[in-house]
Image: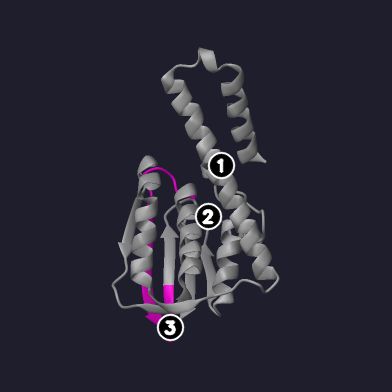
């Protein structure tokens, strides 16, 4: 409901008081409506994907994908948002680590995880994207040096619509579905999804996917 509140509230304001706003105010309110629309669209897409996954109706179209290139693309997508918080996104991913995955699903996994890391990491923090090879699997890691989460909280925050553990004040415009969806998509590929964290020691997610 939160994105809809922003969309309806600011559009009502502009409809009822349009003559009183200057161009700068119109741009500000339009930007908030636009952001609310995108937040709502993301939430709907997450719910639809989770519904299809739980029903076994999510179709994967697998191909050979360079994990390092996929990370580089997601890094580019989030650099502006990270810069707004003075966060650095570091990339440590040599080319040649090929995974057998669905391109759009892999992009969704990585986008969810990087968005989560940028949302929770404090100003001047660092989010690191890396990839390694381990016993026939390619391990993609998204880690940050943010506040972290207690080990006993990890199981809970993987449930749908759960948040917290890390500073809620640093979280923006989410509904607690990002980690749930990333884990479900990883497991749909026959991969494993692991979280390693502790209070004050950052947060690291490892997505291990099969190589071709």
Predominant secondary structure, magenta span: strand
Residue drawn at (60%, 34%) of the image = 7
**Alpha carbon distance from label 1 to label 3:** 37 Å
Q: Which residues are magenta?
A: 120-139
The one of 74 and 34 positioned closer to us in this rendering: 34
Mark 1 falls on what kind of element? helix
Q: What is the quadrant of residue 68 in the picture?
A: bottom left
In this view, 140 is above or below 168:
below
In this view, 72 is above or below 87:
below
**Label at residue 144:** none
Q: Is residue 33 left or right of residue 155?
A: left
Residue identified by numbered label 2: 199
Please provide percent x and percent y for residue 5. 64, 34
Residue 47 visible at all:
yes
Residue identified by numbered label 3: 211
Residue 124 belongs to the span the image colors magenta: yes
Tell me the crowding category of disc 3: few under 14, some 14 to 19, or many 20 or more residues within 10 angstroms, Cα based: some
Residue identified by numbered label 1: 37
**Alpha carbon distance from label 3 to label 2:** 33 Å
The one of 50 and 57 positioned closer to us in this rendering: 57
Q: Quadrant of the image for the N terminus?
A: top right
Tell me the crowding category of disc 1: few under 14, some 14 to 19, or many 20 or more residues within 10 angstroms, Cα based: some
Residue drawn at (35%, 50%) of the image = 79
**Alpha carbon distance from label 1 to label 2:** 34 Å
Farthest top residue in view: 20
Residue drawn at (43%, 67%) of the image = 141
Residue 147 belongs to the span the image colors magenta: no
């Amino acid at each position: 409901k939160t994105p809809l509140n922003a969309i309806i509230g600011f559009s009502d304001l502009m409809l009822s008081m349009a003559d009183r706003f200057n161009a700068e105010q119109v741009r500000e309110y339009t930007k908030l409506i636009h952001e609310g629309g995108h937040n709502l669209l993301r939430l709907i897409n997450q719910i639809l994907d989770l519904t299809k996954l739980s029903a076994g109706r999510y179709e994967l179209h697998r191909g050979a994908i360079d994990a390092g290139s996929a990370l580089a693309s997601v890094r580019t997508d989030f650099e502006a948002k990270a810069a707004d918080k003075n966060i650095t996104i570091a990339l440590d991913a040599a080319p040649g680590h090929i995974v057998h995955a669905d391109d759009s699903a892999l992009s969704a996994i990585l986008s969810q995880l990087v968005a989560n890391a940028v949302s929770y990491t404090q100003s001047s923090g660092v989010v690191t994207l890396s990839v390694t090879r381990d016993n026939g699997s390619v391990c993609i890691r998204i880690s940050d040096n943010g506040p972290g989460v207690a080990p006993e909280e990890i199981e809970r925050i993987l449930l749908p619509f759960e948040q917290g553990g890390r500073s809620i004040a640093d979280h923006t415009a989410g509904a607690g579905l990002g980690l749930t969806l990333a884990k479900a998509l990883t497991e749909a590929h026959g991969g494993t999804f692991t979280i390693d964290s502790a209070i004050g020691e950052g947060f690291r997610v490892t997505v291990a996917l099969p190589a071709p």
